[in-house]
Every structure is written in structure tokens, then in C-alpha cells.
Image (cartoon, helix red, strand yellow):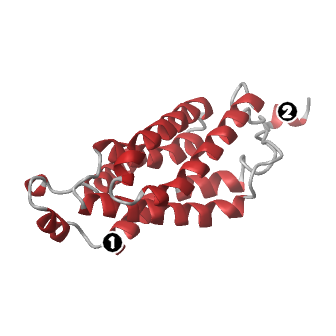
Amino acid sequence: MARSLCLSLVVAAACAFRVPSHRAKAPRRAVVAAVAPAPAWVAGACVGGVLGTPFVVAATKTWYGDGTLNLPSWTPPKGIFAPVWTTLYATIGFAAYKAAAANALPKLAVAHYVGNLLWAPLFFKLKQFKAALGLNVALVASLVAVLPAFGAVGARALLLPYLVWLVFATVLNAEIVRLNPKGLVEANVGVDTLYS
């Protein structure tokens, strides 16, 4: 139930970032009029990012921050994630608005955003660290691939901080995989464990 709800929300968020197909061949002025205003794009990107928050919060209160998972010494403090991601989602939303307003939002950018939204549940809920690492690598590659399209509409600089953070997150994810080769091994604290 929760997975299908999450998937529905991700699909709805992705659809919200498309330029209507009947406007795709319209003159630029008509496309700009058909696109939601910039604040709606920024808010939409931030709301999409919030979808993963329950998974992140639950994990940072338990296994991610309590020593159960081996983390590198350079792992950022958990309080840094919310302000960084909020800022990054805002810039992603504004960059997407600029590209959509110029009728130049690549489909790969939309797929990239959906992949970004899937990373938190994959890592923090499902604890699939290797799969999350693969997704991170795909996110870096797809972001690099769409940067020229955003550059053509003057929005590349908006995505560079996101690229830097995404590369850092990928390296962090890789180090977590290296330090935890068997994944998350949670202790079995049952009656038998207490008396052994």
C-alpha cells in the first residue's frame, strides 16, 4: 500500500514537471504562458523532495546514526541534510522552470528527478545500499548529460551545487557499501541473545 502510494506520488510529481504536449510546438511566448510560474516549480520540486523525509528521519533516529551502520568519519551531521536538500530542490525547481519556459526541458531531466526521489526510500527504507549506489551513479551520469540543455537556457549554474552534492553523496554511499559489505546487520536482541 505504502509503496503504491509513494509510486503514485512520484509519478504525479513527474507529470507536473512536463510541458503540456499540445503546447510543445507553440511559439515560445505561448509556451511561457502555459508553464506554471517559477514559484510553483520551486515548491513542486521541494514538495517532491519531502516525500523521502519520513524514511530519512526514521533511519537517522535509529540505525543510521546509532552505530548500527558503519559510517565514515567524514559523514555530515544529520542536521545538515534537510537545509542542503531544501536548497538544492529549490534550485532544481527553478532550473526546471527556466528550461520548461524555453520549451527545452529534457525528458531525461524528468527521469532524473524521479530517480532522485526514489533514492531515499531505496537507501533509508529498503536498506539496499548497493542498489542505491548504482542509482547514485546513474543520477550523476544523467545530470551531466542534461547540463548542456540547461546551459542553453542559462540554468546550468543553478544545477552545479546539486552536481557537487550528488558526487559527494555518491562517494559517501560507496564508502558505506565498502564499510558494510554485508549490508545492515542488525543485532537480534531476543531472549536467547540475552542469556547466551
Is residue 194 shown above or below 100? Answer: above
Q: Quadrant of residue 58?
A: bottom right
Disc number placed over residue 89 in the picture, else none: none
| Image location (x, y in percent) of residue 179 | 77, 31
Disc number placed over residue 193 in the picture, else none: 2
Q: Which amino acid type is shown beneath numbered disc 1?
A: Ala
Residue 77 visible within the image: yes
| Image location (x, y in percent) of residue 98 | 32, 63
Crowding at mark 2 (Cα within 10 Å: few <14, some 14-19, many 20+): few
Residue 50 visible within the image: no
Residue drawn at 56 percent across, 52 percent down? 55
Is residue 42 shown above or below 126? Answer: below
Q: Is residue 29 left or right of residue 58?
A: left
Residue drawn at 80 percent across, 42 percent down? 72
Q: Which amino acid type is shown beneath numbered disc 2?
A: Thr
Residue drawn at 71 percent across, 58 percent down? 78
Query: Which residue is nearer to you in this view: 146 or 110?
Result: 146
Cα–Cα span, label 1 and label 2 = 56 Å
List the residue tagged with mark 1: 38
Q: Quadrant of residue 57?
A: bottom right
Of the two numbered discs 1 and 2 in the rendering, the one whose residue sits closer to the viewer: 1
Number of marks in picture: 2
Residue drawn at 35 percent across, 59 percent down? 96
Crowding at mark 1 (Cα within 10 Å: few <14, some 14-19, many 20+): some
For label 1, the SS is helix
